[in-house]
Every structure is written in structure tokens, then in C-alpha cells.
Image: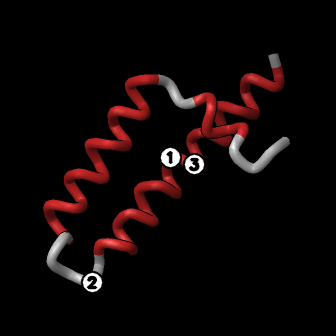
Amino acid sequence: MKRTDHLLLLKDHEIAELINALRDAAEEYGRAQQLRAAFARIVKGVVVRGEINYKKEREL
């Protein structure tokens, strides 16, 4: 498995949710030093969800 294979299993609505979450974090933390940490939390959650989806697809 390549490092990014699991990201390809994100559905369109999941990508939209990711973009919206990043936008919301940018608006909330944009003027603070916490923006990088907020982005990291959001992206990590999506990557974990993508890994779970990837494993489910591999089982089929």
C-alpha cells in the first residue's frame, strides 16, 4: 500500500466536509498560532477515516 492510497477512498461529501472544516478552523484560528495544530487534528481525523475505508474495501 502506498502512503496515500487510503486518501483516494474519500467520498465527495467527505472531501467537502474536510474543506469546510479547514475553512472553519482558518476563520477561528487564523490570527493565532494554533492554526497549524487545528489543521493537523482535522487532517489526521480524515486520514484515519480514510484508512478505515481502505481496509474495508480491501476486505471485500
CA distance for labels 2 and 1: 22 Å
x 41%, y 56%: residue? 42
Q: Answer left or right for 39 relative to 9.
A: left
Q: What residue type is labelled 1?
A: Val
Q: Residue 46 carries which label?
A: 1
Q: Answer left or right for 45 relative to 33.
A: right
Residue 53 x, y percent position in the rendering: 64, 31
Q: What residue type is labelled 3?
A: Val
Q: Residues within 10 Å of mark 3 (few under 14, many from 20)?
A: some
Element type at mark 1 = helix
Task: Reply above or below: 3 against 29.
Answer: above
Pointer 3 residue: 47
Pointer 2 residue: 33
CA distance for labels 1 and 3: 4 Å
Q: In which quarter of the image is the C terminus?
A: top right
Residue 40 x, y percent position in the rendering: 45, 65
Element type at mark 2 = loop
Q: In which quarter of the image is the N terminus?
A: top right
x 68%, y 38%: residue? 6
Residue 38 x, y percent position in the rendering: 34, 67
- Specify which label sits upstream in the sequence, 2 or 1: 2
Q: Nearer the viewer, mark 2 or mark 1?
A: 2
As drawn, the residue found furthest toward the top would be: 60
Element type at mark 3 = helix
Task: Reply above or below: 15 against 23.
Answer: above
CA distance for labels 2 and 3: 23 Å
